Amino acid sequence: MIEVFKTDVDDWSRSRMLMGLIAARFSVCRINFDLEDCDRVLRVEGDTFCPRGIIELLQQNGCHCEILS
């Protein structure tokens, strides 16, 4: 399963912190941010995870996050 999200994360230290939180909570094998993209893309890949849960986790940490369509 692969999901791509649009975020407002704008610095590498915050993205690393969020990747750690996502990895700790969800069964994922790859997480990365592309902060140079205009949508500041978060890409998550794993066997099973809840996209809504990732959105809520980022929102709880003060970030905007939505599924990129």
Image (cartoon, rainbow, N blue to C red):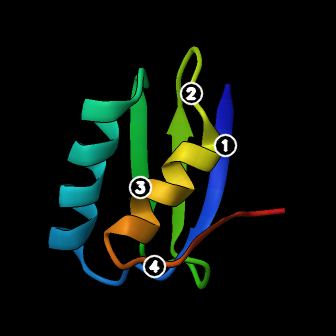
Residue 32 appears left or right of 42? left
Residues at marks 3 and 4, CA–CA distance in whole angstroms: 22 Å
Residues at marks 4 and 2, CA–CA distance in whole angstroms: 25 Å
Residues at marks 3 and 2, CA–CA distance in whole angstroms: 12 Å
How busy is the neighbourhood of tag 2: few (under 14 within 10 Å), some, or many (20 plus)?
A: some
Q: Secondary structure at mark 4?
A: loop
Q: Amino acid at mark 1?
A: Glu
* Image x and y of residue 19, in percent: 29, 49
Instruction: Residue at 45% x, 79% y: name it.
Output: 36
Name the mark on residue 57: 3
Q: Amino acid at mark 3?
A: Leu
Q: Quadrant of the N terminus?
A: top right
- The image quadrant of residue 28 is top left
Residue beneath disc 1 = 3
Residue 26 appears left or right of 23? right
Residue beneath disc 2 = 49
User: Do the residues bearing badges 4 and 2 touch, measured as CB atoms within 8 Å?
Assistant: no
Name the mark on residue 36: 4
Q: Nearer the viewer, mark 1 or mark 4?
A: 1
Q: Secondary structure at mark 3?
A: helix
* Image x and y of residue 38, in percent: 59, 85
